């Protein structure tokens, strides 16, 4: 039994099931069948199918292109400097290290008995930030136990390379980091 | 795995799904037999679908805006400008979001009034009307909360004025404090509005919308009173694919209009909101709040709030008040009430338009 919508009353609902309705559905189904058969045998319909498909693809592409461009983050303007004051002398007491931001990158400044060194704080293994291990007097990454010398050269662990080195000096009580 | 692929290759996909989700395929089968009646007023059947289409665009563009927007007092305006000036096609996404919001509200109003005048709310569709009414409130809520997010002067003062009207209601100060997150429109308000706009209101809207659409599938399309008996229905066409294809044409026209408006009539960026700046000249809410805005100027606020509240309750309960329609009989009283409501909206909007754009267009 076919269900006719739009009528609340059940008796009415059954009344309005017309023959025309059934005929209409038959016509739609046979039209769809023709489309499928035509597409299989080729011909004008086939060409139209391709044309509609191509235009449809073009249409979707025109929408997806701006969305893709929009979603990819644009370059933000940032200043790249060769050297910068990152902090005051007292911020890194003897036998300790502190991470400062230099050109938006984390840079470790070490003070071992008054002798300053600076290198990238990003471990070359998987990018964790390293720390100064005062007991062992070297640099240690807590993530996977990578160890570096106090100048950033590799000692042991899974890391593939040394930490990138920077220059550092203390001038007028300021710590200045510069590209080595 | 190989067995599964072999099964699917033999066209057993439906069978495979059937074994797992059972009766759901019967629901799909049932829905695929949905028909849409054809008659002189069939054109109004497109506007619900158009509202839905613009809502989908709102979700997509809204999610895209969330990639860069920062909902804090200090960063909102800057990130809003960044989207439009620095991000590729950012201007387009924002303009489409703003225009689509306006078109969604417009389509929703057309859909609501056409359903009203065709008495589509009558038995058994009372719940469709009620869910539609809730969706109307939610849509206006989404529009209002979204309006503050650019955090420019216009947004700031429009929302300030809007919240001010709440305080005229009984217990309004209490509600206004909750909405504002304090005694004034500040960064606290922005954070609240943002939360409402991107999480709570869209979530509720999706929930109520699902109910609205499921009811639509089960009850089908309403026919104006007496059309079937008088032989005015020329037949019922299958929803899939016939009506859906026509719906699709409607959406494409809507989409073309949306892109045209976004490119040719962009919304302004404005100045960053400054709570210590005097309100700019010609400040007024968006057009869908003009009627209430104008009415508040014409009568004492208490009168306005009371009459509007009563009118809204009557509007929501119309399927239960119009007893004649439930018996498939026409009642001119309710048609008149509809004409009066629509007339009120149109006349009040025209007055605002006349005062702000014709009489003193200098402010724009």
Image: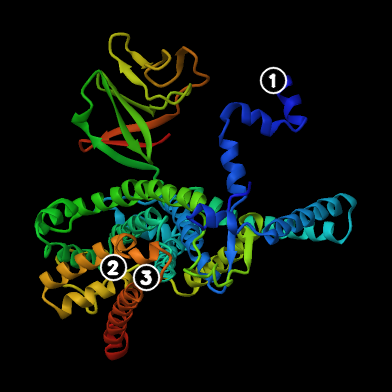
Q: What percent of the width, then of the height, locates residue B62?
A: 42, 53
Whole-percent x and y of residue B222? 49, 61
Depth-wise, is mark 1 or mark 3 nearer the camera? Answer: 1
Q: Secondary structure at mark 1?
A: loop
Q: In which quadrant will I find the C terminus of chain A?
A: top left
At x 40%, y 31%, the residue is A166
Of the numbered discs in the image, which one, if any, rests on residue B271?
A: 2
- The residue labelled by disc 3 is B268
Q: Is residue A55 above or below residue A128?
A: below
Crowding at mark 3 (Cα within 10 Å: few <14, some 14-19, many 20+): few
How much space separates mark 1 and mark 3, taking CA atoms?
A: 57 Å
> Neighbour class for label 2 at 10 Å: few (<14), some, many (≥20)?
few
Q: Give B68 or B293, whichever is nearer the viewer.
A: B293
Identify the chain of the residue marked 1, using the numbered disc in the image.
B
Describe the element under mark 2 as helix, strand or loop. Answer: loop
**Which sits earlier in the primary sequence, circle 1 or circle 3?**
1
The reply, left or right, for residue A92 in relation to residue A37 is left
Residue B95 lies in quadrant: bottom left
């Amino acid at each position: 039994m076919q269900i006719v919508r739009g009528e609340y009353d059940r008796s009415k609902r059954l009344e309005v099931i017309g023959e025309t309705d059934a005929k209409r559905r038959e016509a739609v189904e046979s039209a769809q069948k023709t489309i499928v058969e035509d597409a299989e045998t080729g011909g004008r319909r086939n060409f139209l199918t391709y044309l509609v498909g191509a235009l449809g693809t073009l249409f979707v592409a025109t929408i997806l292109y701006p969305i893709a461009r929009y979603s990819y983050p644009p370059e933000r303007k940032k200043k790249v400097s060769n050297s910068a004051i990152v902090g005051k002398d007292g911020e890194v007491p003897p036998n300790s290290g502190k991470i400062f931001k230099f050109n938006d990158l984390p840079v470790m400044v070490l003070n071992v008995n008054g002798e300053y060194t600076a290198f990238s704080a990003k471990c070359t293994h998987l990018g964790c930030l390293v720390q100064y291990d005062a007991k062992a007097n070297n640099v240690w990454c807590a993530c996977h136990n990578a160890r570096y010398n106090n100048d950033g050269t590799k000692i042991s662990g899974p890391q593939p390379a040394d930490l990138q080195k920077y220059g550092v000096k203390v001038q007028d009580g300021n710590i200045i980091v510069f590209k080595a | 795995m190989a067995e599964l692929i072999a099964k699917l290759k033999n066209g057993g996909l439906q069978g495979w799904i059937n074994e797992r989700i059972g009766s759901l395929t019967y629901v799909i089968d049932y829905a695929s037999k949905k028909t849409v009646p054809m008659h002189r007023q069939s054109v109004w059947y497109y506007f619900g679908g158009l509202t839905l289409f613009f809502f989908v665009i709102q979700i997509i563009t809204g999610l895209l805006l969330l990639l860069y927007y920062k909902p804090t007092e200090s960063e909102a305006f800057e990130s809003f400008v960044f989207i439009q000036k620095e991000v590729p096609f950012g201007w387009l996404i924002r303009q489409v979001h703003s225009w689509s919001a306006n078109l969604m509200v417009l389509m929703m109003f057309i859909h609501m009034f056409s359903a009203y005048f065709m008495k589509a709310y009558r038995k058994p569709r009372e719940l469709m009307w009620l869910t539609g009414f809730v969706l109307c409130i939610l849509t206006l809520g989404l529009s209002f909360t979204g309006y503050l997010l650019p955090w420019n002067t216009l947004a700031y003062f429009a929302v300030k004025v809007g919240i001010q009207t709440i305080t005229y209601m009984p217990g309004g100060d209490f509600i206004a404090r909750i909405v504002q997150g304090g005694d004034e429109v500040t960064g606290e308000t922005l954070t609240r509005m943002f939360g409402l706009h991107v999480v709570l209101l869209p979530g509720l809207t999706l929930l109520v919308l699902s109910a609205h659409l499921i009811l639509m599938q089960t009850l089908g399309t309403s026919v104006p009173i007496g059309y079937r008996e008088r032989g005015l229905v020329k037949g019922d066409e299958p929803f899939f694919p016939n009506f859906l294809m026509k719906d699709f044409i409607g959406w494409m026209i809507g989409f073309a209009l949306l892109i045209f408006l976004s490119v040719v009539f962009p919304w302004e960026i404005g100045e960053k909101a400054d709570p210590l700046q005097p309100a700019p000249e010609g400040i007024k809410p968006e057009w869908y709040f003009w009627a209430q805005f104008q009415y508040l100027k014409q009568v004492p606020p208490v009168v306005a709030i009371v009459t509007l509240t009563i009118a809204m309750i009557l509007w929501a309960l119309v399927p239960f008040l119009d007893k004649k329609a439930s018996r498939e009989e026409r009642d001119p009283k309710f048609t008149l009430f509809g004409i009066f409501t629509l007339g009120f909206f149109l006349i009040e909007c025209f007055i605002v338009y006349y005062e702000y754009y014709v009489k003193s267009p200098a402010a724009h």
